[in-house]
Image: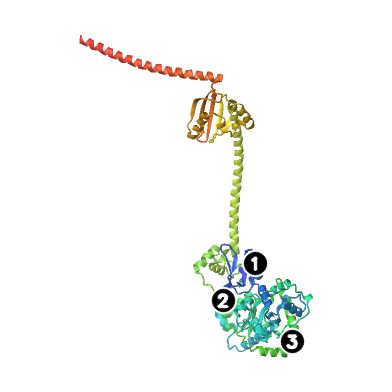
Amino acid sequence: MPLIDINSEKCRKCYACVRVCPVQAIKVDVESAIPSIVDSRCIGCGSCVTICHPGAVVFEDAREETKALLQSGQTVAAVVGSAIPGEFPDITDYRKFVEMIRRLGFTYVCEASFGVDLVAHKYAQLFANNKGKYYITANCPSVCFYIEKYHPELIENLAPIVPPMIAAAKVVHKRYGDDTRIVYIGACISKKKSAKRYQRTDGQVDAVLTFRELRQLFTEFDIKESKLEFSEFDPPFGNKGSLYPISNGVLQAANISEDLLKGSVITVEGRKNMIDAVHELEKHPQMINRHFNLFYDEGCLMGPGTSRGGQRFLRHTLVVNYSNKRIQNLNKREWAKNLKYFLNLDLSASFVNDDQRLPMPPFSKVKEVLQILGKDSPADSLGCGACGFTSCHDFAIAVAKGLVKPEMCITFSLYKRLEHADKLNDISHNLEKINEELTVTKRESAQYQQLADKAQQAVDTILQKLPVSFLLVDENLHIIQANQPLVQMLGSEAVEINEVIPGLAGADLKTLLPQPVYNLFSFVIANGEDIFNRDIHLLDDAMHNISIFTIRKNKVAGAVIRDMQSPEIRKEEVIKRITEVIDKNLEMVQKIGFLLGEGAAETEQMLNSIIEFYKTVK
Ligand code: SF4
Ligand code: SF4
C-alpha cells in the first residue's frame, strides 16, 4: 500500500496538495482532474496531509497492524518519540501516559531518546573526524528520501548513521530479546516508510503509529488518565536525546558546538530552507564547508502525525520542560554505563540511488505550454508563485512533464473562467431571443387555433344542414363524422347511438350499411378511385344514389347519399336524367343529320358532274 493516498470522493480539486508538494509527487489526471500520489516520487513529508482541509489526503494507518501484534501473544515493545509532551499537554504526568500505553497491551514502553543519545554520540565522532568531508545528518527520513530521489549526487554526503528510531529499536532487541516486536510511536509520517528500509535486520520496527493514531486507540479502548495509576518507562533511559523534537536538540545531545564562530554545523529546518540548503550544498560544498543538520519540518514538534492546530512554541516549551524533568531525575552513571554498552551496536547505515528526476522536456514543448498559458512573453510571466513553482517557466516545465494541469495557474484559470462566462452570456442571450420568438409563435398559434375552430364549426353546421346524407370514414372503415340526414336515413338504432356519440364517431360502417354498399367504400379506400352516381338499395330497399370520393388517399373517404324518393331529389333527378336523354337524342339526330347532309352533297356533286358530261357529249 502506498504511504499516502487521496480519497477522490472527498477531494474538492483545489490542488493545494499539488502546490505544496516539494517534489511534484502528485499528478493530476487529465480526464477526471483528480490528483493522485506517485508513490515512487513521494518523500513522505506529509505536507499534502496537513494542507488538505477536507481530509481527502490520508496516510497509511497502522492501528490494525498494531492491534494484531498486541493480540498475537508475542512480546511487544512501544518505543515512544519524545515529542509526546507537545502532543499530549492534556496528560499532566508523563508516567500516566506510560501506563496508558501499557494498557493497550504493550509489554515494554521505552523512550526513543536513548536511541537519540547513541546516534548523537556517533555524529559527534563523525563530525570531529570528518577529514575535510562535510555531512548531512540522516535523522529526518524525508531529507534522506529527498537526497536519494532528487539529489543522488549527495548520497555520499549523507551521514552513514541509522536514524534514532532504528538505534532505539536495536537497543530494545539487545536488551529484551531479538524476538521482541516493536511499534514506534511518533510525530512523523515518513518514519512509516523509513521503517520498511530496515526490515529483516536487527532494529526492525514492525509498525509505526503516529500520535494521532495513538489518540484514536486510547479512545477506542476507553483508556483515560483519570482511571490509571503511574507507571515508569522501561530502561534504558534517555538523557538530552529527549530534546530531539527541537531541530538542534540532536546537536545538544551530542554536545556539538553551535557557536557561530567556532561551530562546524548549520541547522536548517522547514521545507523551503531544507531544499535551499541542499541546492547550495550541492553547488558550493567546499565554500560552505559546514555540516548540515537538516529537518524537513520545523522540528518534529509540528510533524504531520501530530494533531492539527498545535501551537509550535507552546509545544517547544512543553518538550523542554519534560526534558528538564527527565534529565534532573536521570541516574547519569547508569546512563553513561548504558551508553558505553550500547555503543557497541552496529549503528551504520547506507543509502541507495533512487533517482526520480524526470528528463527535461524539449524547449519547443515548454514554449508551447507557455503559449497556452498566455505567458509567452516575459511581461506576461507573473511568477506569482500561487501554483507552488518559483516561476511560470518552471510551472510550464512541470505541465510539459505531465505532472500538473494548466488550470493550476490562477491567471490561466481566470482567463478560462471569463471565456466560459462570455460563452454563457451568449447562450443566455440566444435563449432569451428564442423565448421571445416562442411567445410570438404561441400567440399566433392560438389565433390559428381559434380560426380553425371557427372553420370547423362552420363546416359542421353546413354538413348538418345539407339536404343530402353525408359521411366521412377512415382507413378502417369507421365513421369519422356523419350528418343528421344520414343518421335519420340509417334508422332508429342509429338515431339512439347518435344521441350518445354525436356524429356516430367511431362506429363500424359494416354494422350500419348493407354489404354491397360497404364494399363500395372498401374499394374506394383501398384503390383511391372515386365512384360517382351509383344507384343503390339501402336498408328499406329504397333507391338511393351514392357518390364516394377520396379525401386523403387510402386514409379518408367521404360520401354523399341521395334519397331518390325525396320529392326535391326526384324532381331534380328526373329533370337531370330527361336532360341527359334529350342531350343524347339530340346528339344522335345531329350525327344522322350530318351524315345525311354529307351524302346529299356528294349526290349533288355526282349529278352535276354527269350533267356536265352530257353537255359535252352532244
Ligand atoms: S488538497 Fe489536494 S486532495 Fe485535498 S481537496 Fe485539495 S486537491 Fe483534493
Ligand atoms: S507526502 Fe510530501 S512528497 Fe509525498 S505527496 Fe505529499 S507533499 Fe508530496
Above-or-below relation of 276 to 328: above
Q: Position of residue 545 (x, y in %)?
A: 52, 24
- Quadrant of the rendered image holding ligand 1: bottom right
Q: Mark on residue 143?
A: none
Contact check, label 2 and label 3, Cβ < 8 Å:
no
Q: According to the image, label 3 marks what residue? A: 330
Contact check, label 3 and label 1, Cβ < 8 Å:
no
The quadrant of the rendering that contains the N terminus is bottom right
Q: Position of residue 144 (x, y in %)?
A: 60, 79
Q: Earlier in the sequence, mark 1 or mark 2?
A: 1
Left or right, 529 with reference to 168:
left
Identify which amino acid the numbered label 3 is placed on: Leu
Above-or-below relation of 26 to 82: above
Left or right, 588 with reference to 577:
left
Q: Secondary structure at mark 3?
A: loop
Residue 551 visible in this rendered orientation of the protein: yes
Above-or-below relation of 566 to 254: above
Note whether ligand 1 is within 8 Å of mark 1: yes
Q: Mark on residue 56?
A: 1
Identify which amino acid the numbered label 1 is placed on: Ala
Identify which amino acid the numbered label 2 is placed on: Lys
Separation (CA) of disc 3 from disc 1: 44 Å
Q: Position of residue 268 (x, y in %)?
A: 64, 79
Specify few, some or many for label 3: CA neighbours under 10 Å numbering under 14, 14-19, or 20 or more.
some
Of the residues tagged 1 and 2, which is closer to the observer?
A: 1
Q: According to the image, label 2 marks what residue? A: 149
Q: Secondary structure at mark 2?
A: helix
Specify few, some or many for label 2: CA neighbours under 10 Å numbering under 14, 14-19, or 20 or more.
many
